[in-house]
Image (spheres, coloured by chain):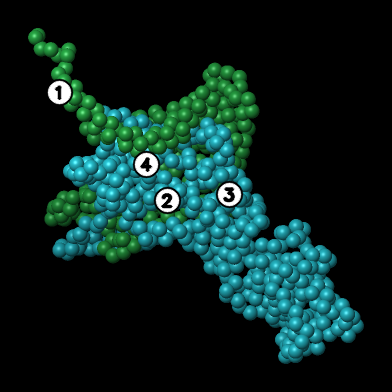
Amino acid sequence: MGMPSAVPSEALVRSQKLINWQRLGRTLPGIVFLAPAVIAFIIFRYYPLLKGLYMSLFRWDTQNPPGAFVGLNNFSLTLSSDVFREVFVNTLLLYAFGMLLGFWVPVVQSLLLNELRRGYYLFRFLYVLPVMVPGIAFLMVWKYIWHPDFGLANAVMLILHLPKQLWLSDPKLVKLTLRLPSLLGGGMSVLIYTAAIQNVSLEVIEAAIMDGASAWQRTRFIILPNILPIVGILFVLSLTGSLLAFDDVWIMTGGGPGYSSTTLVMGVYQRAFVQNQYGLGSAWAVVILICTLILTLARLWTMREERM
Amino acid sequence: MQDSTLLEGRLPEPPQRAPAVTHIRMSWQDKAYRAVCYVLSILWVSFTLFPLVWLLSSTFKDSVDVMKMPPDFLPRVPSAYTIKLDFSDVAASDPGNLEQVIREDLAIAIWRVPDYLAAIHYGSITAEAYVQGKKVAEATLPSSQYSQYRGRIWVTQRLSDNLVRRDLDKALSTARFRLDMSGLGPTPAGLPNEETARIAKLFGTEVKPSSTLISVGERRYFPAIINNFISAWNWPSRLYKGMTFAGYMRNGIIITVADILLQWIISGLAAYALSRILTPRFSRIWTVFFLITMMVPGVATLIPSYELVGKMGLHDKLLGVIIPSIPGAFTIYLFKGFFDALPGEIFDAARIDGASEFSTFFRITVPMSRNVFTVIGLLTFLGSWNNFFWPYLILRSPKVWTFTIAIYMAMGGSGAAGAQYSNAMACAVMAALPTVLVFAIFSRSVQQGLVWSGLKG
């Protein structure tokens, strides 16, 4: 039309300039505030991630990087190796044992806790106390308990007139032994579940009481169904970390005996820092990354569904 | 639920109890049910705490009792033994050499007896020298000194009198030794009792001093119960001269404090920029840039990070642990959630007043967000203080270990052999004290923080 839109008026130019100045005055601190974090993320998150992908394509030579390009050979080596398969199964079994033995425990503990009139806060504090003790202290005392010669576990077996076990040194028993302590429960989950239980509406419970529901019925038919969503969330969250077991197993057994308790992350550690095969180790790491990403995306997807 | 409160920036309240339903009389079934709940809870709590109790109990056992089968539930009260030796014959036949013989015999008595009777439960051993009824010298060796120096002075399986004579000065320098040839003491008395007969039996058969044994005495000596802590405190000096366990605690504290400060400052500033400075479009882009890294497990960046830290020359340095832990996506997320919910008018007012973004951050935002700073500090504390894998990878020489690595090494690494359980467990108890203290002080914030982080994954 007849509007001189191509030639902006002088006032408009001036106001735009003004805005730009203002913008700069606000952008500059923004850049300064953001820069350290951005740089740190690039150096210690993005760069190593890409470098790892890159390394997995080479028979990496630490003296003379990058060494010979081998394409996807590291991956085919990894996926076809018996060790990888055994280690993968180990990791899944450790996760499965941990979940079977330990996942339901804090739920039950919190439900029991909820019925207590006196000592509720004390008991909850005591359940959470183990979180505060450095993990290494716990692992050490468990290693001591499982010791075949002078450990408490075999002393108990003795009292029960059962045969002595090698526990952590027994390739068949080691994975179960590692996860048996999860039966004791406690920890952070108790805190989360008790918080969830307290969010259950009091009116519903009172109505149930009016209708003559017993304490057990209230727990079973009102409180439990109400906290199930949180139980589900914690379960899905645990899946994401299912392939990442390392610290505790490493401290307790070092992956042994043989490969019987070696986990995937430990496999990466061994490839890279024991056998000095950085390329192969990176390929292992990339496989773990891909599996974990799939689990994480699945988790985000299911959680989004739930919210809608 | 938790997510929405967080996005609105409110801190979720720590779990508080709903008021109990008290205005209705309980049926007997309900009472029975409650009783069952009490019983089960008490049982389960004791099971949960059992490893801790066992840890504490084992810490006070000596290196022999810790390997007893079946184990005692409670540690025993340690004993102090006194071995009295008579040097009258030596004084008569070889007066010129008396002092030297006394030194030798006392060293032999205090070192060889515990060495030979490895199965004896002792807190300290004292050897006393008498000449014609007069006490002229005494040497005392607490068990903590014994376990600390035994392997350093002599690396043999079993000691002999001659070995002790050869390293006499070292043997006596680790013990409390007094020699005083003047004055008269009471005539020593006492016969070897049942408990100490074994020690008496050693003299003349396995242990052959030049003097003659008068008596062996035993008494309960409670203070020696902390001997494990003393030897645990000192054991790092075997690996690095002059190092004590305090050095490892200090390394841990340096890393933890640095981590907390860096998270507060770097993540705090970044989150503030995302929340209050950037335009919504840029904020969204950069938020994704930060948060997407939460999906990447640490193992995926392990090898290149290790190489990178090496290239920076930070292997074996505390900085090599501190710097790579700067990027904290989760803390940025928590900070941003909180800053987003602060009332915007305050910031507008500050801007109109001409306050710079820096002063807005430090003078307005920080004081208003004390709560979230505390929670993030505590979460970082728990993470850094207990961190094992990365420090273990980076900090290889004994000088720079943190206490987690030190405990792991005291345990003999991954193997079961060579484990010094009593040392390692005493170290673990000492390392647990700061965390328990922090938990006791900040109980509310810690519980808040744990509920938060637990639901975020």
What hue represents chain A?
green
User: Left of B296 or right of it: where is A107?
Assistant: left
Give the cyan chain's letter.
Answer: B
Chain letter for mark 2: B
Pinpoint residue B206: horizontal percent, then vertical percent.
Answer: 81, 70
User: Which residue lies under the disc numbered 4?
Assistant: B267
- Type of amino acid at the residue the image marks with label 2: Phe
Numbered disc 1: what chain?
Answer: A
Label 3 chain ID: B
The secondary element bearing badge 1 is classed as helix
Q: Amino acid at mark 3?
A: Val
Near mark 4 (Cα within 10 A), the count class, few <14, some 14-19 or many ≥20, is many
Which mark is drawn over residue B381? 2
Question: Image point 53% across, 46% down: which residue?
Answer: B318
Label 2 to label 1, Cα distance in Å? 56 Å
Q: Tell me whether marks 2 and 1 sit on the same chain.
A: no
Q: Nearest to the eye among marks 1 and 4: give it.
A: 1
Report the residue marked by disc 3. B400
